Amino acid sequence: MKIKLCLIGDRAVGKTSLVKRYLTDHFSEEYRHTMGAKVYKRVVNLLLELRQKMTEVDMTLWDIMGDLPLAELKNESYFRGVQGLLVICDVTRRSTAESLDNWIATVPESVRDLPMFIIVNKNDLIDQVELDEDDVFRLGDAFSSPVLLTSAKTGNNVQQAFEFLAKSIVEGQLGPDADFLVEQRFGVLERPAEGSAKAF
Ligand SMILES: Nc1nc2c(ncn2[C@@H]2O[C@H](COP(=O)(O)OP(=O)(O)O)[C@@H](O)[C@H]2O)c(=O)[nH]1
Ligand SMILES: [Mg+2]
């Protein structure tokens, strides 16, 4: 099964570092540059718990190149065919969490309802933290999405971020038990009423 995941989030939150960490812990190959984006690929075997079956997932990871504004990405193929989003902020800069609203508001409408994980990166920088536990929970509520604290530096939760999202997508495509599995893995998050998706 082929899966396309896109990374979004402010400059320097660690998007590229997370992809590199995920890829270089294992064999990988950077295989394509497109306008405004770098596309990476990794093939993994993931265990689907419910079916007790391994499945091969061919992941392409789309990372924004440099500082390209999202408005330009929308004109490119960045979001075409995407199945899941990693929405990334930096635990040491509150502003990067505040701007997630803007990121979500600017992605194409069809993309907004896709499986999405909020990633709070740089969790190794414990003495510079600007987001507390409540903030992290509020982010999850606001976007009705699982939140993972990661560190591209130590590798903490990086593989989980990519592979749990990939599994959510695969399981979502595999039938009605998918929601149950996602709830079991992450706990249930209430979907907020229309228009209330504001964490800050
Ligand atoms: N301490 C720490 N630094 C990180 C982490 N992730 C990224 N960085 C640093 O943050 C800066 C921006 O990272 P980069 O991956 O280029 O961000 P991008 O613009 O979102 O792609 C670089 O100096 C990285 O070394 C992390 O988890 N912990
Ligand atoms: Mg980058």
Image (cartoon, grey):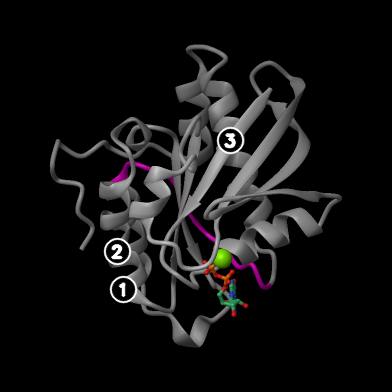
Q: Reading the chain from its start, which is encountered first: label 2 or label 3?
A: 3
Name the residue that disc number 1 marks: 95
When asked about the image quadrant of residue 45, the answer is top right
Q: Is residue 145 magenta?
A: yes
In 3D space, how far apart are the residues under numbered discs 3 and 1 (Cα atoms)?
28 Å
Q: Reading the chain from its start, which is encountered first: label 3 or label 1?
A: 3
Label 2 SS:
loop
How many dots with numbers?
3
Q: Is residue 158 magenta?
A: no
Magenta span: chief secondary structure = loop
Above-or-below relation of 76 to 148: above
Image disc number at residue 99:
2
68 horizontally vs 40: left or right: left
Work out which quarter of the rendered image holds the C terminus and state it. bottom left
In 3D space, how far apart are the residues under numbered discs 2 and 3 (Cα atoms)?
23 Å
Q: Position of residue 148 (x, y in %)?
A: 50, 55
Q: Nearer the viewer, residue 29 or 86?
A: 29
Name the residue that disc number 3 marks: 4
Identify the residue at the far bottom of this view.
127
Which of the four quarters of the rendered structure image does ligand 2 lie in? bottom right
Which amino acid, by three-letter code, is at mark 1? Ser
Label 2 crowd bin: few (<14), some (14–19), many (20+), radius 10 Å: some
Label 1 SS:
helix
| Mark 3: C-beta under 8 Å from nearest atom of ligand 2 | no
Q: Nearer the viewer, residue 85 or 71?
A: 71
Residue at x 33%, y 74% (from the top left corner): 94
Q: Which residues are magenta?
A: 143-153
Residue at x 49%, y 43% (from the top left corner): 78
Label 1 crowd bin: few (<14), some (14–19), many (20+), radius 10 Å: some
Q: Position of residue 87 (x, y in %)?
A: 44, 53
